[in-house]
Image: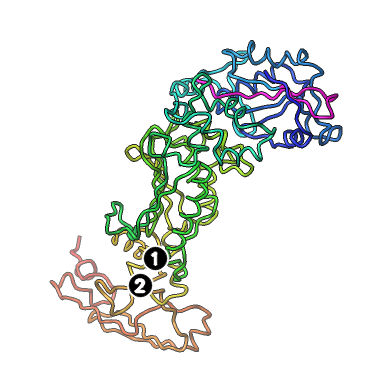
Amino acid sequence: MERRTIPASDALALIEREESHFWDHKSSQSKGTVIQKIAAGLANSDGGEFIVGIEDRGKQAVGLDRWQGYSSIEDATIVLEALARDVEPAAPYSIEYLSIQGREGQGLACLVSIRKSESVHYTADKKVYVRRGAATLAIAGQTVTDLSLAKGARTYEDQLLADYDKEDLSTEDELAYFLRSYSPSTPPDIFIRKQRLIDRHSGAAKVSAGILYAESPPAVVPKRCAVKIARYNTKEREPRREHLADTPLTVEGPARVVIEETISAVTDLIESVSVLQPNGEMAPVKYPPEVLKEIIVNAAIHRDYNISDDILVYVFDNRVEVRSPGSLPGSMKLDNLLHDRFSRNPTIVRLLNKYPDPPNKDIGEGLRTVVAKMAEARLQSPVFSIEGNYFVVELGHTPLARPHEIVMEYLENHDEITNSTGRSLTGISSENSMKDVFYALRKTGKIEMVPGKRGNKSAWRKVQSLDPEDEVEVAVSQDEDATMLASEITSEQAGASGKRLPRTPKRLKARRFVAGPARNRPCSCGSGLKYKRCCGQTPA
């Protein structure tokens, strides 16, 4: 336990900080049950911090007046009891008692840091809580069982590094950059100790420290942990070396820098790819900015750093693939990916979230945001899969509209469409499947084949509407010899009827009748029945 006096600016920053997955504030009037709940929720999730002694924003208290702490450390005993006695097992915590410089009369606020635990923590009433966004929620039944099973895995980010210690870590430029905006102001040596980024006995730094703040993490972490970006001039599922457009780009550096530079490089590479649009124009591929950001951030913070491999980003002619080393962590499955969450690297996730403009601002919303933004942009939903030892996210360039709609939109601005063009527009890979789309549109009377084009030159066009000035001969077969009687319908008659004429050929071929036995011929009486069914019927 430490006691510190902080500047009013730091105190105001704590007061105004928005509640989140990693941060909360409570009144000094809060009961022990409230403190138990939030402590257990943070320990069961990804860890975080909360401060006791800050009143909610309201008419009675604004700005620094919201700081209404305990008059003495003894009065704050309720916080210690809730953490160490009432939560079972005791939550892994550390506490600082803070007062405002020049405003010591407003009391001491308890700043509590909770680490993610390997145990499932219960409150005194035997309930289990987890943190979801800015809320602390109770769970029960199978969800508690799943949490317990997931807790058993020890994360690689806590492993100690052999050649990287607290002296190396405390002088890193990225750590200095981070601490310039960190509140309350904290020296590097105190920060890395409080955040458990080093071993207290040996001073060896942990993998998470190297990933977050080392100038070149691959130099200190004994695993490959960079990002490789490659552009392939193909749509094939298994690209070959000759499809590479250029030498793959490697991005290295602290986690924040890697994320930012990867997003920028991939965005530029994607926008260099032009695809055929439904309106028939070639235009650069564009995804909503949130989509690429969320997928790349997700790959960087949730990858398995115990696997010696880089994150791979492949940009193809028709899709983008992001491959993150490691299968899904803990209790995560493909079918609960958008609803549940589990952090393989809670320290990396939590400390990245402390940057002024954190890349992982909306914890737990990343992949849901991706799906929602792709739908808003009228693009096909991303595809999530597990391939070998990778979690793969695939973004297609294909519009969300049904293939039939895309074909008709294209024909609004073009005279005809081929099978090849249709496949490029719709993302359909099979020629026969594309034909099925054309056939379905033909059946509804919307398109027809272009006359004179067959085989590999075949094309389709919108059904040509009739010119009301054209004369159309309609042939009707009526008599036994199949003589065609043609009636001419003039444009004046068509206009008088007020109806659009059906499209019919200008001349119909005569139907040929093959004469069979006399009994099967039409009866000469003109009834329209066969002779054997009419006059030639056998008397009863």
Which class describes the residues within 10 Å of circle 2: few (<14), some (14-19), or many (20+)?
Answer: many
Q: Can residue 85 be seen in this view?
A: yes
Residue 124 shows in the view: no
- Magenta span: 97-118
227 vs 161, nearest the viewer: 161
Q: Is residue 444 magenta?
A: no
Figure quadrant of the C terminus: bottom left
Residue depicted at 37% across the width and 64% down the height: 424
> Considering the numbered disc 2 on the image, is that residue within a helix, a strand or a loop?
strand
| Quarter-of-image position of residue 108 | top right
Residue 114 in magenta? Answer: yes
**Which residue: 81% across, 31% down?**
66
Image disc number at residue 460: 2
Q: How far apart are marks 2 and 1 (CA)?
A: 10 Å
| SS of the residue under disc 1 | helix
Residue projecting furthest to the top: 85
- Residue occupying the point 56% across, 41% down: 173
Answer with mark 2 or mark 1, whichever residue precedes in sequence. Answer: 1
Q: In this view, does 389 lie above or below 126?
A: below
Residue farthest along the left direction in this orientation: 517
Task: Tell me the amino acid under the disc marked 1.
Answer: Leu
Tags 2 and 1 touching, CB below 8 Å: yes
Q: In this view, does 461 lie to the left or right of 483?
A: right
* Residue 205 image point, x, y percent: 49, 28
Seen from the viewer's position, the closer of residues 316 and 141 is 316
Check disc 1 and report the residue beneath it: 441
Q: Position of residue 91 (x, y in %)?
A: 59, 17
Which quadrant does the N terminus fall into? Answer: top right
In the image, taking residue 292 as reference, residue 415 lies left or right, namely left
Q: Which amino acid does label 2 sit on?
A: Trp
